[in-house]
Every structure is written in structure tokens, then in C-alpha cells.
């Protein structure tokens, strides 16, 4: 009898609804997605894209985003555009990415509006068009998007019109009030330089500090330099180096170059050429042109690192192509003397002329004499050809720089 009662109790307990296996939140979302709910499809896509509760799978995420997008989910449209722009889970295709961004923007996605504005500003996949970029940023800003407010504000800061400058500060302040760290940095920079407002270095530093404490690397670098120079704050080498080091840890190349400079020159810290080279090399590997030039010079001189003509040439060439005037002149000397490359007087003359045109006025006379001396080793016809090449390069640079203006 006892065993029968036990069996009956066990059976009744097993039949109680509250004891049925409970679904996890992700299982519930998956079931809703299976039923075709757009919001669930989007959430499940995010889970697969970020590896939350499931194995990361970009291809599966893209499929789910598409299903949600086809049901009208603007967030899914925007994220699908990002995946096409990066080639994550789908083939890289800027045209398809733009199509999804436009659909998402039309459906009200502020994120997509920002992406479209950025592409128009940079000429990425579309013709460069600053006016259209501004229009997209404004649409995003008016929807309350912090990034849209910030980008609209920074774009308007380039204006010389008083009304647009005032508008720039209004949008930057709105972004800052929403806690957007780069907006505090932008306001600080404007206060530092007196752009659209009266210059106030103390207020500039205050804004940099707020942004730095929110984690903005550019603000940390600016705050570090302010401490080193005593701009708007008491001069302090220790505080300056501390903030620069924090910024550099976040891959801020301005901070890396500043740390390289102070270690190379022995200002604020003891001179240490090996540390200087290490900071320059980190920044150069992240694409900083002046750091590339420093690396080229230090490899060439054997200061802070082992002398290496090939590496000196490679870094100097990269810096020259990125527009660093000193690197152009150094590259000319390398071509002239065959350092890290075969001697080539025509290339030497081309880069010497380019450097002389770009160098600051105080050093231009010396650079022009240097170019003329190299030119004496080049035939008249060859010099004409090089001059034509330089003119064509300037025209090409102008088109790239000013397209859409």
C-alpha cells in the first residue's frame, strides 16, 4: 500500500504544470523566431553574431538578420548592411551594404543614417558628398542619436559661418549631455582653439578630463599634453606622462608619438632612444605618418634600434607617400645614394621637388637648393617628365581631396 501511495504521489507530482521543464530565455526567443516574429529573429541574430548562449556564427546571424529585415525590422536592415560592408557571414559588397543602409534609414534607423553620412563624407562606395553627409547626420541627430549629434556638430565646426558654428556647439552639447565622451573632447578642442567660442583653456581641460574619465583616448592624450605644457592646468610631467600612457594603451597614436618625442628628447623623462623608437614603431604600425618618418630616420641612423638600410627605406617611403615633407626629402637622399634601394636619380629628383614644395617656409630655400643639385644629375627631358608627373599627382590629390565640395 505504501509503495502504491508513493507511486500515486509521484505520478501526481509529475503531472503538475509547474514542474514541467522551463525554457531558457534563449530557447523562448528561438521558438518565437521559428514562429516568424521579427523581434525574435533580430535578437537571435544578435546572439549568433556575438556568441551569446550559442556558438558564434556570422553566417547564421546574417540569415536571421535578412529574415527579420524582410519583415521590416530596421535594426536588422542596418546590421545586415554592416555585415556586407565588413564581409562578415556574407561576401563583402559595398553596393549591397549601401542598399541595406538606405532601406534601414528609410525605415527610421538612426544607426543607418549615421553609416550613410559617414560613407558620403569619406566617399566610401559612393561619390564623396559632404552636403549629403551633413543631411544624414542631421536626420540621425534629430532622432536623438548621440553619434549623429556628435558627427553633425564636428562637421559644422569646420564652417566659418557664425550661425553654423553656434549650431555645432548646440549639437555637441546635446551629445555631451547624453554622455557621449567624444563630444566632450570636441567641445574641449573648440575651447582650446577658440573655434566658435571664446578660447578658454581651463574649460577645455575640464572637458578633456570628463571625456578622459569616460574612456576617450583622444581626450586622455590631450589632457596629457596639457599637463606637460601647463596649458589650462598646472604643469606636471608625472600627470602628463600618466595620461599619455593611458591613451597609448588604447592605441591612440598621437599619445604614442608624444611619448616617443619626450623619450627621444629627454624632456619630462630621462632620454631613452630605445623607448622612443618603441613608441614610434607602435604608432607607425597603426598608420601614423610622422611616426613612420621617425622609424625610417632611426633605422637609417642606427639610433634606438639596429641600423637597417632596407627598413629605413621602407618606412621613409611609406611616410613620404603619406605626405610627410621631411620623409620626402630623406627618400630623395636615399634614392640618390642607393640606401635600401638601387640608386635612381630621377626618383631622387621627383621626391626632392615634392618635399621642397611641401616643407615649411623656413626650410624651403635649403630644400629647393637640394632639389636643384639632384636635378643637375638628371637630363633636361627627364626633368620635364618628372615635373609633369608631379603636376599630375597634385591634380589627382586635389580631386581626391575636394571631390564633392
Image (cartoon, rainbow, N blue to C red):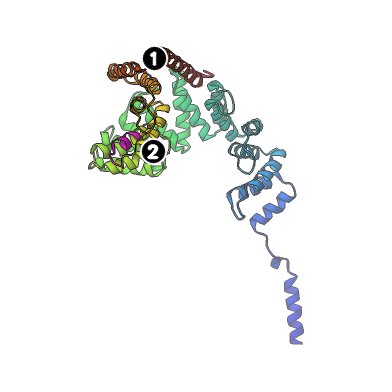
Please state the extent of the stretch shown in magenta in the rendering.
296-304
Q: Is residue 195 left or right of residue 113?
A: left
Question: In the image, 18: left or right of 349?
Answer: right
Please identify the dominant SS of the magenta region: helix
What element does badge 2 sit on? helix
Q: Residue 132, located in which quarter of the rendered image? A: top right
Image vertical order of residue 22 relative to residue 325, above or below: below
Mark 2: few, some, or many residues within 10 Å (few <14, many ≥20)?
many
Secondary structure at numbered mark 1: loop
**Does residue 244 appear in the picture of this structure?**
no
The part of the image, by quadrant, that contains residue 118 is: top right
Q: Is residue 144 above or below residue 358?
A: below
Instruction: Out of 65 and 294, give the one closest to the viewer.
Output: 294
Per the image, the residue denoted by label 1 is: 379
Q: Is residue 397 left or right of residue 135?
A: left
Answer whether residue 297 is magenta in the image: yes
Locate the N terminus and report the quarter of the image it occupies: bottom right
Locate residue 155, reporting x and y percent. 48, 25
Give the residue at mark 2.
Answer: 283
Q: Which percent across, then down, holds residue 252?
A: 40, 39
Residue closest to the far bottom? 1
Rendered residue at 59%/28% (across/down): 125
For marks 1 and 2, give the one nearer the viewer.
1
Residue 228 position in % (x across, y down): 27, 36
Where is residue 92 shown, x and y percent of the image? 62, 37
Amino acid at each position: 500500500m505504501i509503495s502504491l501511495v508513493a507511486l500515486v504521489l509521484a505520478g501526481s507530482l509529475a503531472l503538475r504544470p509547474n514542474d514541467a521543464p522551463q525554457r531558457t530565455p534563449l530557447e523562448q526567443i528561438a521558438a518565437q523566431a521559428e514562429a516568424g516574429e521579427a523581434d525574435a529573429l533580430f535578437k537571435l541574430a544578435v546572439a549568433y553574431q556575438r556568441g551569446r548562449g550559442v556558438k558564434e556564427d556570422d553566417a547564421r546571424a546574417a540569415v536571421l538578420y535578412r529574415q527579420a529585415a524582410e519583415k521590416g525590422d530596421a535594426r536588422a536592415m542596418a546590421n545586415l548592411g554592416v555585415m556586407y560592408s565588413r564581409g562578415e557571414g556574407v561576401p563583402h559588397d559595398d553596393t549591397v551594404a549601401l542598399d541595406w543602409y538606405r532601406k534601414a534609414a528609410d525605415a527610421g534607423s538612426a544607426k543607418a543614417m549615421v553609416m550613410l553620412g559617414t560613407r558620403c563624407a569619406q566617399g566610401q562606395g559612393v561619390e564623396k558628398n559632404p552636403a549629403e553627409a551633413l543631411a544624414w547626420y542631421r536626420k540621425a541627430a534629430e532622432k536623438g542619436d548621440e553619434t549623429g549629434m556628435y558627427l553633425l556638430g564636428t562637421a559644422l565646426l569646420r564652417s566659418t559661418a557664425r550661425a553654423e558654428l553656434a549650431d555645432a556647439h548646440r549639437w555637441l552639447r546635446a551629445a555631451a549631455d547624453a554622455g557621449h565622451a567624444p563630444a566632450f573632447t570636441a567641445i574641449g578642442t573648440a575651447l582650446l582653439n577658440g573655434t566658435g567660442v571664446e578660447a578658454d583653456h581651463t574649460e577645455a581641460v575640464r572637458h578633456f578630463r570628463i571625456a578622459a574619465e569616460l574612456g576617450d583616448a583622444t581626450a586622455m592624450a590631450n589632457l596629457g599634453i596639457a599637463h606637460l605644457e601647463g596649458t589650462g592646468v598646472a604643469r606636471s610631467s608625472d600627470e602628463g606622462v600618466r595620461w599619455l600612457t593611458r591613451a597609448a594603451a588604447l592605441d591612440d597614436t598621437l599619445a604614442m608619438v608624444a611619448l616617443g618625442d619626450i623619450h627621444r628628447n629627454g624632456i619630462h623623462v630621462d632620454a631613452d632612444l630605445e623607448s622612443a623608437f618603441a613608441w614610434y614603431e607602435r604608432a607607425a604600425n597603426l598608420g601614423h605618418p610622422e611616426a613612420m618618418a621617425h622609424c625610417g630616420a632611426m633605422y637609417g641612423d642606427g639610433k634606438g634600434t639596429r641600423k637597417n638600410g632596407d627598413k629605413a627605406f621602407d618606412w621613409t617611403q611609406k611616410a613620404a607617400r603619406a605626405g610627410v615633407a621631411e620623409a620626402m626629402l630623406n627618400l630623395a637622399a636615399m634614392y640618390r645614394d642607393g640606401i635600401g634601394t638601387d640608386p635612381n636619380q630621377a626618383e631622387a629628383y621627383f621626391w626632392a621637388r615634392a618635399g621642397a614644395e611641401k616643407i615649411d617656409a623656413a626650410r624651403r630655400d635649403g630644400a629647393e637648393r637640394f632639389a636643384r643639385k639632384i636635378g643637375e644629375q638628371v637630363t633636361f627631358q627627364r626633368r620635364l617628365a618628372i615635373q609633369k608627373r608631379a603636376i599630375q599627382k597634385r591634380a589627382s590629390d586635389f580631386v581626391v581631396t575636394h571631390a564633392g565640395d
